[in-house]
Image (tube, helix red, strand yellow):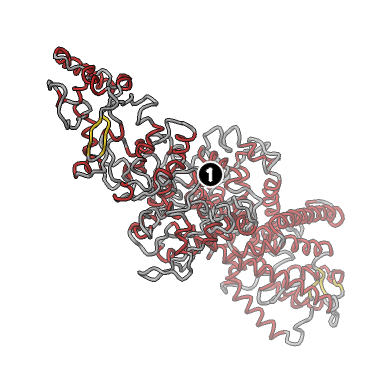
Amino acid sequence: MRRAWMTFCAALLLAASLPAAARAQDNADCLACHGDRSLTTTRGGRTVSLCVDGKKFAASVHAAVPCVGCHADLQGKEMPHGTPLARVECGTCHEKEQKDHAASLHGQAIARGDQLAPRCVDCHGNHDIAPVHSPSSAVAPQRVPWVCGKCHQEGSPVQRQRVIHEDHILENYSESIHGEALLKKGLTVAATCVSCHTAHTILRHTDPRSSINRKNIARTCTTCHSQIEAVHRKVIRGELWEKEANVLPACVDCHQPHKARRVFYDQGMANADCMKCHGNPAIRASRGGRSLFVNADECARSAHARTACSQCHSEVNASHVRPCETITKKVDCSSCHADAGRQYQTSTHGMLAAKRDPNAPGCTDCHGWHGVQLRKDPSSPIFPTNIPDLCARCHREGNKAAVRYKGTEHDIIERYQESIHGKGLLKSGLTVTATCTDCHTAHGVLPMADTASSVNPRNVPATCGRCHLGIEEMFNASIHVTSIGKTDKRLPVCNDCHTAHTIRRADTEGFKLTIMSQCGKCHEEIAKTYFDTYHGKVSQLGYTKTAKCYDCHGAHDIRAIGDPKSHLSRENVVATCQKCHPGATRRFAGYLTHATHHDPQKYPFLFYTFWGMTGLLVGTFVVGGVHTILWLPRALQMRRARRHALPPKKEAS
Amino acid sequence: MSQQAEGAVEVTAAVPGDTRQYLRFSRLNRVLHVVMIISFMSLALTGMTLKFSYTSWASVLSRILGGYETAGYIHRMAAVSMVIVFIVHVNDLFRRRKKEFGTWKAMLTGPDTMLPTKKDLHDFVGSMKWFVGAGPRPRYGRWTYWEKFDYFAVFWGICVIGSTGLILWFPEVFTLVFPGWVINVATIIHSDEALLAVGFIFTVHFFNTHLRPEKFPMDIVVFTGRMPVDEFREDKPAEYDMLAEAGTLQEHLVDAYPPIVIRAIRTFGWMALGVGFVIVVWIIYAMVFAYR
């Protein structure tokens, strides 16, 4: 673009110069005098050469431009011309650059009349301006540091007399990863001063338009480091860096300007600086007086050992003597742990925290502070075997969460400890056993009634299925899922039979016996009739060897009787009976396992047998009973009579 | 009335001072009754645990009996014992027919027959009258009508409960022939007939033979086989008269058992009575207060 623009200007000037040539004002005329090396003048008390090297000019990017094209005030003037000449206006052709420069820090200084402010020629040169991409250009990448460094180096008038916040700029840059690449390894695409500060639009970092403003720095760095999100993963997520630059550390917070290295930094907000104050056990907050002591050893052993203080306490500002004085907010763990943070905000814990409920647990209540440990570390409060105790801090009966709870689950900690999961975890030390967080999730804890909750009836099979996958698959094909068992009644899920916190081994006697009443909660009639049969009666006596609901119907794979895959389908029922009755036949399977003698329509045989037997029973008892009762007075009479008649021989036998 | 007067005259048939007693039951019959009591009690206890499984009583008892499986074995073994009692008794009938009567007709139509007779009907009507004070006590013979009823009730019960019990014992075998619901029907019949048997034995039979005030607290004739002649004459006047007339009473008199034997028998009797009463109380509780 720029090249095209310049070609266009050159063409214009060329056209303009044609009549001028007629007036014999071409470059050769100028060089007639200015080609002389001894041509000098005195300016400001100093002798200044006025010689223009014709060769160099011919090699320059402006070779085709006549002298009067730039020195416009000499247009049409008689030779030799008078002095001094007016200042050359590069902006005549380079309008945009001129404008940018005028708005920049440098341009503003010129406007103020600052003598030290750089103009075009200070960086680009004058008659010998090489094409910008030519290695011999004054602003070729490898020369840029020196161009800028002319003013911005230690001891220069600018550095001494103007307010420049950074020091040893050139020195630091040359030792930085960018400087080394450019200067030592000749990598011309390495960032130079202008890569970050721009060439003409140089502005103070506090100016929102500046390329090095906090808000823009990420965009500036990503011009080259376009895949940097991958390196910084969730810190920035591509968008956060730009959208929420205020909560995130900007590039320069960690990779300090001019000093960006591969190694970590010992200066600024490095941990050592923080520990200068916070390593003192006596340090307390001026407001509230809470301890601000940070145990460095604890940090060093923590999961965040390689995380700098400033990465969490991101509001620190390196330009302050106490970088932490700019901190206004608490540490936001979600800056890095974005998924956990988002989940937490939707959880009961997070929603309570949003309402500023004093009981609401935050990240540190569960994870700890500077000594935070990974889940796999046995000393971590979130190590599986520690989780029940962690949750119990609030959820044990009488504690702050338990007293708010209005549901039906009580003594959950104690019950859990006695459950198969609790015993597995705490007695056997089986760390893959389900703990509180396996079912309730760690960060998305929601009450059961919430449809998004992992323990909502809709989601329970999937939650249990995370470990018990085979069971879940069977269950999902059973009549107890809504897609198959079409009913408006509530269908059972895992915990309806297994309970939530008191889950027992399914092969224990107690479980086997209670499961019948669990089925009976919904299948009331069918359970009642079951208890009228031999199977039911023996089970009711407390024995587990006779058939119970699941022995015939299956446990998780209960299907409609009409389903060919059902244990009780025509194809399978005999085999099902044969599990216990090896000699069972199809006729044997005709036994009515849920028979009742109270239903004359369904079971007329049983109904009439029962009432026939009852009639016989009642009839016999009535006759026998009446006979006995009528007999009683006579029998008493006989006893009295015999007593009188045979007083001495009472016990003859 | 005239019969009673004759009996009063014939009291001399027994020699005064003779303490021998009338032998009412043979040794075999006594043994069979004891075996039957034991098997019946066992059947009742083990069976009722299942029938009334919904009471807490039942599960405790089931544990005491060694669990439902052991109880099941006890139940079946007791059933087998009772069937053996039944077979031995029938066999004894055949033996006695041959030895004592010669023909079935002689045995079944004689005065000591177990079959119901016209006299039983008269006795029953007479008893009703006596109960309401409209007549004297009938002169009962060797077997009263209620004793005959009890006797045939056992026949009926063994057939009904035994056959259904067999179906329940071997359901796989029986369903080779019968449809599956026959097991359900057999269950109802077995259980209700058993309830009838247990209820009847432990109330009506107990009263008729033990708790009747004139026999109270128990009549041990079925264990000793013998009863005092005075009591015999009073209880079974028709039979006494017949023996007295024939002059064969002396042939039926034997020595009484020594007191220690009597005490042992009474102890056994008390135990049987006690178990029976407990079962009755339990049934009433289960049927009236815990029925579902």
Q: Nearer the viewer, residue B189 or A534?
A: A534
Residue B235 point in image, percent of width and height: 72, 72
On screen, residue B101 versus residue B286, left or right, reads right
Does residue A332 sit above or below A280 in this rendering?
above
Question: In the image as oriented, which residue stretches furthest toward the bottom?
Answer: A648
Residue A488 point in image, percent of width and height: 39, 43
Does residue A77 sit above or below A532 in this rendering?
above
Q: Nearer the viewer, residue A510 or B284?
A: A510
Q: Nearer the viewer, residue B12 or B70?
A: B70
**Secondary structure under badge 1?**
loop
Q: Chain of mark 1?
A: A
Q: Residue at x 50, y 50 (%)?
A: A598
Q: Nearer the viewer, residue B51 or A483?
A: A483
Residue B286 point in image, percent of width and height: 57, 63
Judge whether residue A449 can be spotted in this image.
Answer: no
Residue marked by disc 1: A466
